Image (cartoon, rainbow, N blue to C red):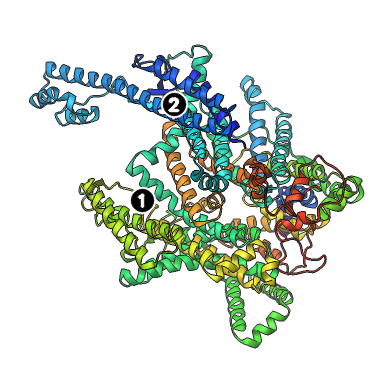
Amino acid sequence: MNERLAVASLATLAVLAVLVAPWAAFNRETGARSAILLLPNRTIDFTGRTEALRAPGQRVVLSLSLVALGALIGAAALGARARRIVWIAAGGALLVTTMWGLDRFGGAVDEQRLIAVTLAIDDAIDGARPTLDIERLEEIRTTVGERSVAATIEAARTAGLIIRRLPYAGAALGPAAFLALVAGFVALVAGLRVVRAVNRPLDRVLAGAAVPLVSIVLALAAAAVVILVLQPTPQAAGVVIDGPLMALAGRLDTLWYAYYTLFAGSLGTVKGFADALSFSTPLIFTGLAVGFGFQAGLFNIGAPGQMILGAIFAMFVGLYVPGPAAVVLPLAIAAAALGGGLWGALPGWLKARFGANEVINTILLNFVASSLLLFMLSSNPTFAAGAVRVLQLLGVVIGSMLVAYLVPWGRRALGRRPRLTLAALGVVVLVGATILSQPQPGDTPQVLRLPFKVPGSEPKSYEIGEATRLPRLAGLFGLDLRRAPSENQVDLNVAAFIAPLGGLATLLLLGRFRPGLRVRTRAFVALVLGAVAYSVLVVAGLGGFALTVPITNLNGSFLIAIGAAVFVHFFLFRTTWGYELRATGLAPKAAEYGGANLRRNTVLAMSISGALAGLTATHYVLGGALEDYALRQSIPINDGFDGIAVALLGGNTPVGVVLAAFLFGVLKNGGSSLNITFSDLTRDVVSMILALVVLFIAAKGFLGEGYTNPLRRAMALGETPTEATGEGEADARAQRPPVYGPPPAGADAAGEGSAPAAGAPSTDREDPS
Amino acid sequence: METVVLVTLAASAVRATTPLLFAALGGLFSERSGIVNIALEGIMLFGALTAALVTYYVELPVLRETPGARVPYAPWIGLLAAMVVGGGVGFVHALVSIRYKADQIISGVAINLMAIGLPAVILTGLFANSTTSAPVANRLPSWTLGPLTFSPLVYGAFVLVPIVWYVVFRTPFGLRLRAVGEHPEAADSVGISVIRMRYTGVIISGVLAAMGGAYLSIGAFNQFITEMSGGRGFIALAALIFGKWHPLGVLGATLLFGAFQALETQLGGAALLPPTVVQSLPFILTMLVLAGFVGRAIPPKAIGKPFHKG
């Protein structure tokens, strides 16, 4: 995509938006009914109760915005240098104008709100009802200008006066202003390419983030269609849609507010942010799990099942292993990883041993795990006596298999003819089962009472012991909100977080740009800079940042998730094993030729992947994110599928996964507000967006090879690639109109590992169905 | 007494086979052309949803006029709509896999994910309930043929087997389809349009899988429930491998799985085993089958690989 085209079309869109779309909203009632403002001074009211509001400066903002946007479009025709300079100037102007306009508008709205509050207080003082503290109200009345509106309302409430029904709820950004800001920002960034030092990092970011970004935008756009179809414009009874402009503005406002709801809660408040982090915790684990599999060339769709097994294992440790937290808690975490790891190793082994495709097997194991969980948490499952005998038979057979496998010659004997062994076993089991399942006189059904299941029909286990519980956010700050709910203020030393980070960054940057310096010197410089930064930050007042700790499900599991991401990064990119796994994923044949053991790697990769998925139990069971610290049937295993979207969006790298998981955490948290705010939308909109993201990323954002293939992109940018042979030529030919002829020999081999020679059966062969 | 049980078991096995057979035969077209179609599960769900919704909205105006009236054509229109939508979803899968050369498994997974989210969103919009559609009054009828009484789709599925066999193994179209899946470059060199054959294969697979889904919602049942396919698409895929990508093999494999599902219902119903245990049996069976101890399956050689036209 050409940057001129991009900026110009974005600016055109912004022009249209500034002309006909809502620029700001100044009243918002429950049910998302709104009163919105279109530049200049056009009010459209869907609440039926809101007065028009005249705010100063709107004509100025409108004309300046249009001029700046026009300059952005016009500059596309200029030469590179002039164009970029105009973009910087006009983009900056657009940002400043819009911010200024919003600020003025917000001021006007606040003024009106303040007037209304003052009037309400005056009325109350005149009325002098006995429930009111009149002296206090008069004091508030005299100081009304010194406080914010919200603070005044709060103060009046303490004096017994509850003020409701303000004429305006407050000023909020509208889609037109948002688009203007985006256009300004994009133009500014594109313009900065005039500075040579910006080019390379910008290119790198664009190359890495283009497909995910475009995919997200496309997914949001596709979801917009669904939202518009399903959700009519919220309006009060009696409001008549008057003309096409009002209808259009209403639709745009609905769409805008739906997305606003999805994002604002999480990004605007501390509690929302913490909740978003809480939602993203399991997604980090499952995203890492799927991404790890992808890196090794395996598609692990079994994260849901691995989550369940991890949760079951963690629950067992939590319930039955006594001891101090320092021992039991790590044990429970390890158990979660072990459970998921074993459930992942099974399809890995099936693939390595029998060449059974891991995609279908992991899917099937999800169903098996779901049934297992349901079985464990169902109330008193009943077995017929015959069935119990069959299960005993199975136990004996599996037990003797295990014993045979532990004895070396037994393992050899079984391993020589694996299929025959399995078939014979199958016959033994089938015949035995048929005989044993015949009803015999005196049989009574056997009721199983599972010891960990709570009595009653609720599908959950007992709560795990205190020692194996991970603390929630408040607990991490040393607070106990259950015992003392009001003591939730902490002094957060922000400086102590930032300063070491700054020091570390200095250390790394010095290493990159001044490699000649000795480590000792670098460390000293970093230390000094960190100390200076710390003192500056403390002076700036960040030493004791008063934080009200919200009540949230965010818990210690988040730290484990970050730790897991660091571990995966280190493992994949800093160890020989990781290197081998990645090599196996890129080109299995070549890796095998280079000495990698494909079978072992397959099992290893699936085990680690499964273990990562199993660690979600630290959030849902040990972290108590589902109401209490118990294993529940409601454990949201769809997180496992969402992990696919997270991994793909994050490019299968740990850093990308964490970022993508945070984005989806925000969306999921917003999804719950969507349920409440809109009558016809549900949180399922979010799962749809996730699915669309996967689809669009699979299609490489519909960007075409010219953008996604680094070689061709370099050619499009006018830089001569140094190695324009083989793949490049084949791709160039692929772009030509169809001509029948022999296929390029390099085309297939240039892709993923090509098939082995015909008729050579081998277990590592890709047969992806 | 014993025979009654057996007849019931056989009949319910045939019913359980029907959606699997549709999906597996659909998958056969797709995979024979070289495109992995793990989206069968999702396409079934889309088919089931469309069938239920269209039937409901076709019969609605008539039922408003005269409550309790029969609207015999409604489910057929629903079925047709399901086939169209199934073909459409198949087209999306084909577009992403062929035109944009996406990883076919990821594309299929995306469609499966969509089939979980989108129905819930649509149902909420239409019925203020995110898990079920309103029940339809007119399901597909039951046709009695001698001693058999089944939904027409049941007969359809079994009649389809020889038709598919004939199409795939005895017509030029079938030959081209197989050629494209085995060796696209060779097929291309003799003038077969690989791209068009693959699009056709995947779209047919969508149409057939959607028929299986429609059977679930308006044949065997009278409404759509989210995730009502319950893994049948994946089992169908396994049946396709087990049946070695051959219609007759597929018939045998789906009958086996169908019989197992019927047995599952009987076992669970008779309180022999807890239903939760029985539920997992077909999946375990499928895994054992996939492990290949019943004979190794050789897939179409070019399966899963995007075709780069020379």
Residue A601 visible within the image: yes
Q: Give the total of numbered labels.
A: 2
Q: Residue at x 57, y 30 (%)?
A: A225
Give how far across and how far down residue A355 sits, in percent. Answer: 70, 67
Select label 1 or label 2 by which is in front: 2
Label 2: element kind: helix
Q: Which mark is residue A553?
A: 1
Inspect the image, locate mark 1, and give the three-letter code of the amino acid beneath it.
Answer: Asn
Q: Report the chain holding disc 1.
A: A
Relative image position of residue A551 (x, y in whole percent): 30, 47
The image shows residue A366, relative to residue A519, as above or below, that is above
Q: Nearer the viewer, residue A732 or B175?
A: A732
Chain of the residue under the numbered disc 2 shown in the image: A
Tell me the crowding category of disc 1: few under 14, some 14 to 19, or many 20 or more residues within 10 angstroms, Cα based.
many
Measured as percent of width and height from the top left, residue B231 is found at: 63, 52
Q: What number is the disc on residue A177?
A: 2
In this view, the residue in front, A487 or B115, is A487
Q: Earlier in the sequence, mark 1 or mark 2?
A: 2
Residue A40 in percent (x, y) is at 42, 15
